[in-house]
Image (tube, rainbow, N blue to C red):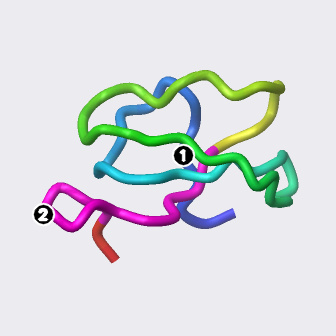
Amino acid sequence: MKDTLKPGQKAPGSGQVEIVGPRGGRTGQERTTTKGKPLPPTPKSGQSYVPVDGTKNGSGFKK
């Protein structure tokens, strides 16, 4: 899946990321990230993150 981020990877931007399953299914759960900080662990093995909404202050996710 395109644009997925793994737990522990440094966040490319600040904002909200959604947890997705191993096959890309949405969970509806979101986490807030800070640019350059590691992404938190996911509740289950095999899950990853997808950027949803970047912050508006210039450090948000790039389109």
**Which amino acid type is marked by label 2?**
Gly
Where's residue 9, x and y in %?
A: 44, 31
Is 46 included in the stretch rendered in magenta? Answer: no
Q: Quadrant of residue 38?
A: top left
Q: Quadrant of residue 61?
A: bottom left
Q: Which mark is residue 59?
A: none
Where's residue 37, x and y in %?
A: 30, 28
Q: Residue at x 71, y 47 (%)?
A: 29
Q: Which mark is residue 58?
A: 2
User: Looking at the rendering, in which quadrant would you find the C terminus?
Assistant: bottom left
* Residue 53 higher or lower than 21, as above or below: below
| Start-end of magenta stretch | 49-61
**Which amino acid type is marked by label 1?**
Leu
Where's residue 56, x and y in %?
A: 21, 67
In front: label 2 or label 1: 2
Q: Kindly identify which residue carries mark 1.
A: 5
Which of the marked residues, 2 or 1, is nearer the chain's N terminus? 1
Mark 2 residue element: loop
Q: Residue at x 76, y 55 (%)?
A: 28
Q: Residue at x 83, y 47 (%)?
A: 21
Q: Residue at x 52, y 64 (%)?
A: 52
Where's residue 50, x and y in %?
A: 58, 56
Residue situated furthest left in the rendering: 58
